[in-house]
Amino acid sequence: MKKISLLLFHILIGIVVSQAQTFGPLHVDVFGQILTQLTFQLEPEDNLTFNLVENEDIQPQGRGVSIGRWKFSLFNPPESVSRYEVVYDYDSLAAPDISSTIDFELIEIDDETAEQAVFTSGNAHRILVSGENTVIETRLGARLTNKGRREVALASASDEYSSEITIMLVQI
């Protein structure tokens, strides 16, 4: 009986082994991801109130008064050229209950070269990025236009003249 059992066992194992099948090969695809990191920040100056009559820097011939800075950072950009614009939008200085307004211009000041670029409302600073990490930091200033200086001479006194400057980053 043992021999028959042992013989049956060997026959069953032989049948199972002879019917064994191969599965595969199986594959696993591994993916990696690097995300583009884009930041745009604005840091206004602490004191943004200026004497429009006596401050020489805010006069049309002056270097302008510093009102803040913006910083554009782009890390891991696509290899193709990316285009951005920093768009400025603002109105003349105005005060509540006073009909007169005062024209001024926005300027970008390069701290290394002291060069200035003038931007009127609706103008834009273009940024081209071509596959390299990019950091641009630009200081902003403001000064009266010649028309604005004449308007200051005729305007009513007020400590509430103001203008909201909108700064937007737009991908083009």
Image (tube, helix red, strand yellow):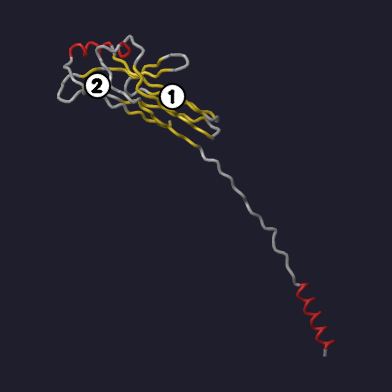
Residue 18 occupies quadrant: bottom right
Q: Which residue corresponds to the image point at 33% horizontal and 18% vertical from the top-left?
A: 142
Q: In the picture provided, is 26 more to the left or to the right than 95?
A: right
Image coordinates for residue 105, horizontal then vertical, percent: 31, 17
Q: Which residue in the rendered view is the most extreme toward the top? A: 61
Residue 161 occupies quadrant: top left
- 27 is higher (above) or lower (below) than 65: below
In the foreground, 26 or 9 = 9
Q: How many marks?
A: 2
Q: Tell me which amino acid carries mark 1.
A: Arg
Q: Which residue is mark 2?
A: 93
| Quarter of the image where the C terminus is located | top left
Q: Nearer the viewer, mark 2 or mark 1?
A: 2
Q: Which residue corresponds to the image point at 37% horizontal and 24% vertical from the top-left?
A: 68
Image coordinates for residue 88, horizontal then vertical, percent: 35, 25
Q: Which residue in the rendered view is the most extreme toward the bottom? A: 1
Q: Which residue is mark 1?
A: 126
Q: Find numbered disc 2 in the image and state the secondary structure of the residue it sits on.
A: strand
Q: Tell me which amino acid carries mark 2.
A: Leu
Image coordinates for residue 156, horizontal then vertical, percent: 16, 17
- 64 is higher (above) or lower (below) than 3: above
Residue 156 — which label? none
Q: Which residue corresponds to the image point at 36% horizontal and 12% vertical from the top-left?
A: 63
Image coordinates for residue 64, horizontal then vertical, percent: 34, 15
Q: In the picture provided, is 101 more to the left or to the right than 88?
A: left
